[in-house]
Amino acid sequence: MTHPDPVHPAWLPPEAFRAIGSRRTLVLGDGLLAGTVHDEVADACARHGGRVRRGAEDGPHDLVLALTTAEPLPAGVAGEVRPGSAIGAEGYVLARRDGVTVVLADEPAGLLYGLFHVVRLGERAFAGERQAEQHRPAMRRRMLDHWDNVDVHPVMGQVERGYAGGSIFWRDGAPRGDLARVRAYGRLLAACGVNAISVNNVNVHATEAHLLTDRLGDVAALADVLRPYGIGVHLSVSFASPVVLGGLATADPLDEDVRKWWAGVTERVYDAIPDFGGYVVKADSEGQPGPFAYGRDHADGANVLAEALEPYGGVVHWRAFVYNHRQDWRDRSTDRARAAYDHFAPLDGRFRDNVILQVKHGPVDFQVREPVSPVIAAMPATRLAVELQVTQEYTGQQRHVCYLGPMWREVLGFRPWGPDGPDGPSRPDGPDGTAAVTVADVAGGALGSGSGSGSGGGSYGDGDGYGGGLVGVSNVGDDPYWTGHPLAQANLYAFGRLAWAPETDPAAILDEWIDLTFTPATPSGTASGDAEPAETAETERLRRTLHAIMGGSWRAYERYTAPLGVGFMVRPGHHYGPDVDGYEYTPWGTYHFADRDGVGVDRTRATGTGFTGQYPPPWSQAYESLDRCPDELLLFFHHVPYGHVLHSGSTVIQHIYDTHFAGAEEAVEARRRWQEAAGLFDPSLHARVERLLDEQVRCAEEWRDQVNAYFFRKSGVPDLRGRRIP
Amino acid sequence: MTHPDPVHPAWLPPEAFRAIGSRRTLVLGDGLLAGTVHDEVADACARHGGRVRRGAEDGPHDLVLALTTAEPLPAGVAGEVRPGSAIGAEGYVLARRDGVTVVLADEPAGLLYGLFHVVRLGERAFAGERQAEQHRPAMRRRMLDHWDNVDVHPVMGQVERGYAGGSIFWRDGAPRGDLARVRAYGRLLAACGVNAISVNNVNVHATEAHLLTDRLGDVAALADVLRPYGIGVHLSVSFASPVVLGGLATADPLDEDVRKWWAGVTERVYDAIPDFGGYVVKADSEGQPGPFAYGRDHADGANVLAEALEPYGGVVHWRAFVYNHRQDWRDRSTDRARAAYDHFAPLDGRFRDNVILQVKHGPVDFQVREPVSPVIAAMPATRLAVELQVTQEYTGQQRHVCYLGPMWREVLGFRPWGPDGPDGPSRPDGPDGTAAVTVADVAGGALGSGSGSGSGGGSYGDGDGYGGGLVGVSNVGDDPYWTGHPLAQANLYAFGRLAWAPETDPAAILDEWIDLTFTPATPSGTASGDAEPAETAETERLRRTLHAIMGGSWRAYERYTAPLGVGFMVRPGHHYGPDVDGYEYTPWGTYHFADRDGVGVDRTRATGTGFTGQYPPPWSQAYESLDRCPDELLLFFHHVPYGHVLHSGSTVIQHIYDTHFAGAEEAVEARRRWQEAAGLFDPSLHARVERLLDEQVRCAEEWRDQVNAYFFRKSGVPDLRGRRIP
């Protein structure tokens, strides 16, 4: 460990800037982020021979990046802005006419995002004509939560559920001090559209609590470095801060001294960090303190923090992940899946306008397959952010290839009220040909509005209000590849891109990521006349290899792990690898109830926990019905005999056998593809991925054998195809 | 944690010395331990008004403790030694005639053990006449292994498998420095007959390795404090020491430089600690280094250390706990139970005379019920020590009452060649009326002799050679009650007493312990004319309470945990509480193979792993036979259907239900008895035990419900008595 490994450039290798850096660019506009845009282009030009000018100058220019407020705009550029149509805070217009590529934005952040759009296009940005396209993010807040601890936690380590080494922010109780690394991180995030991070774990331990007060300078230092890339900084705080830090006798949110304490402390935060984003709170959950201790509800709890933040435009991300983690496994009537809805739905309308209820995408906990959380359709008068887990806690811990873009796309495209539900702002060109509201619409603010000051709700596109958002739990650490598994970079990239544009095809995002990361010289779809045929063929092989390995990796992971939506079956504690009964007799509320006759959780209204009733139609009926429930969620909603026949025509038990043999085989095939592609990748990257694929194959076979053996021993049903089950 | 709790006196409260301390005592003889005897009596006299003299003096005396070499012996005392019969190194003769109680010994250690015998007798020592009784320990070495780490291990902590706080020797990488505590510990050990300890964990980590060389002074300081109580100090060493500490390129035991290195380092050890006991080695096991790395066997490995120790009379305790802990659970032909025999039996006769092969009492790992290890009968030409686990890793972790005396008595009294086997030195008055060799005889050296220098084998009673021994893994820590659970003190006490006298009834040992610890003023069986009737009644209640709670606690624990000898079913890692499948699909080799039809491990020669063949007759036949296998070991040796009928008349499945309901009910009953006895105990001790019994009840019910639910789900067989199974 004596020589620091060089940090991998991820999707911003120098080559990605060749098209821009070899041309003549004009940057028009003031402000910190316009400066960032200029400096990015200048760096690229220094490397690739182009030039960049700032302020009004005569051309010729190949690329103009201009604020709409810049005076004077060059001839022809002003016309790209449609009269009366504001582009919006982070949006931009991209066009190309008469040999000039133009990016126009109302604000400097838009210029930055426009610049990275041009980077993604590469040579294509400078070819032909391009009708003006307006781009704006679907989500106001595209945020990564870092579960990073300042102190090394005795059980959870430096980064809770982190699989990429230590934290890039903290080490052994102190700031890491490597601000160049933080800056590089901010740049990567901006390039995929992320605009906010939370810098510490939602489980706020003793040292971390002090980031709010006497260690605030550590947070301000991070904010200073991230600001030029448009990344706002948020802080996870302890609900007990008034007691723990303030020395008050109570943290009761209705106590006047507590209100004043939060107001005072928040004022000092904004003195230090004027563009501070706000607080993230995990309250009354898994041992964290919260308002229940004072007989208050979570609206009371969230509102006292929101009130303190409101003068500065800050928000509270209040997590809906509240459940009883000391459940009695013998009690089949308690259902952890119900908990978030039961706790929060009754509070709809009671949250202040700058409270954002942060809801995990599924009702349990980031399993490889869950239904969408019913909370998302249950709180029309509340701002919501949907939380995804980029760090692969339950999806292979960055030792397995598991490209999560397709899962997130499914979640974001899910229509909580069905295809005939209320229209949202979505384009009606989805696969189901309807404009009905999607999860992405809800997260984008289509429905949510606070109950409070009347600053209005509506979609972020409306340009006012606090918006909603998409939040991802970061998968980044101080690993040289950022994410442990080099291919897990794609998940970070896809998270940002889907937060900006949730309707994007995850395969297209994968292409973008591949082209930027591995083949910047020959972007996808370019008719690259100067690229040599051999190189093009290699590039195509590389692209096909990565699509083959990554494109279906989420579903392959699903196949070899817990079947049919039943979840868990992981080793308790670290959550890696199989243990079918690992959580079956625990207080954690995550059971499969397998016996010699059948398996699954009866969550119906008719005979089970009634969880299906938390959904609006048509899902409340579909999930309730054994006939209509989607196969992939069958065991999440129903307890069925092993002989139950799926829509696929297979029995449950045979499906278990078939998918587990198939999933493990896919891991073997992925390794084979990777081995064949040795010459196409940097050798050290290739070697690391190859080692990881060995582990993935081993672990997938372990999953296969344990799950199959478990269900064979329970059911006694032999495999129809006579394969060996140990 | 600011005020240190006072340390509990365990079985040596001041009251235990009242009978001696109120009388007139003469101590005759020189030497360090004779001084200890004098000082003990003097302390008691200072408290209770008696007097003590040293050296020949006129009487009258109530008690004379004299070395046979003392000149002149008082009149009447010399006659207690039978002509020509040496008492032996640690033995003593106890007699009472003409109003004088006499303890005679050849060596000072015998005086010390005799003194503590008188302490145990209390007033009875000074009543009536007493024919001369000769006492000598069955085992040469009665040893406690401390699995204490010097550094806090990141997973295992300060004491591996320790349930009584930190170490009394080490803290956070350094000696603890509380030598008064160590001295008090040595005194307790001497009082129950222990004469050796190993001061560090058999898993020797980086810091601990240095105790052998540059940190040897830390060991010498402990030896200095323990020497006055006759406790020899041993050290766990790393087999890789020549590499790790010596800078050699190899630790190959046949390498000449390695031999020289061990010789040199051992010479320095004896320079610092002239009565150093020897080395303890865990090699080629669970990641520890060993001779296999050099293509050598374990005789080669042990002998190189033994050769270095031989000039000083030191011994190597070489652990037989060698197995493959990376087993493939799919492979049913590999059997961890076979491992120790397979590794070591072929080496019989190849170990040097001062190698003691340290064999766990069962073939697997300290489960609540295992057969006796076949290694014990397999190595007649090798010195053996039998290893017991006093620390309750698998027997409730000192949160559950589990008095292990009865289990150890069963093990020590087991006749490896059956009741018709070769005669041992045991008295033929056992329950089976035979003098056939027992496990205790083997551990006592009845069979074992080294292959080496011809210094002879034979029982320790023969007075020469290195002997065998009984080794216990210590349950002691820096907890104020020494053992976490106050009642777990009885296990430490019983270990020492059984190591001295293996044929002792564990109920009698429990009485001794109760009387010393709780009611020293009124020892059991005394016609105490001056005790008030009320006190006697209370004392009797206390004794009955503790017998009710502790006497059957091992079998109660067996009832509510893994059934019929199958073992494990504990939570992986920490090993506390139930997890029926916790180890079922792991590499650890501990499986139960339950499926919908049956459960158990087929270890027969006919259809299983062949493990039964490692036993000599009659056990090889008895264990092989489904009809003759004892019920309590049935699932250790056989895989049977749930409907298999036991000798008890119950089916296996009904036995599982019945024992689990009964065992949990016994825990409830134990708590009830304890609650009723509130007034009989020190309030803080009572409160601590009451809290622990609450946890025991909770945990026993968890065991009951998980095991019953698991087997009901698997078998589908309802409880005949219709009780609720969750």
Image (cartoon, coloured by chain):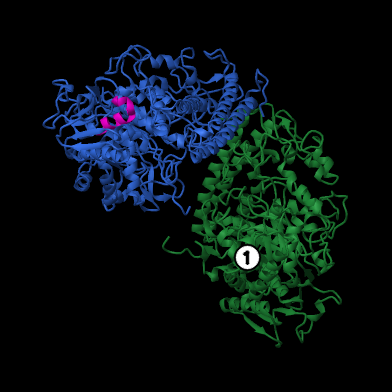
Chain colours: A blue, B green
Residue B257: percent from the left, percent from the top?
70, 65
Q: Is residue B120 left or right of residue A139?
A: right
Residue A657 is a magenta residue? no
Q: Which secondary structure is most common in the magenta stretch?
A: helix
Residue A595 location (% of width, % of height): 59, 25
Letter of the chain that mark 1 sits on in the rendering: B
Query: Would residue A354 be seen by someone viewing this image from the given angle?
Result: no
Label 1: which secondary element = loop
In-image side of B129 versus A95 (left or right):
right
On screen, residue A137 versus residue A718, left or right, reads: left
Query: Compared to B29, does B563 lie above or below?
Result: above
Considering only vertical position in the picture, is B70 above or below A726?
A: below
Q: Nearer the viewer, residue A370 or A600?
A: A370
Nearer to me, A239 or B560? A239
In the picture of the structure, the residue carrying the numbered disc 1 is B246
Q: Quadrant of the C terminus of chain A?
A: top right
Magenta segment: does it hold A116?
Answer: yes
Q: Amino acid at mark 1?
A: Gly
Of residues B658 and A279, the one nearer the viewer is A279
Q: Quadrant of residue A623?
A: top left
In this rendering, position of residue A61 left or right of residue B320: left
Magenta stretch, residue numbers: A112-126
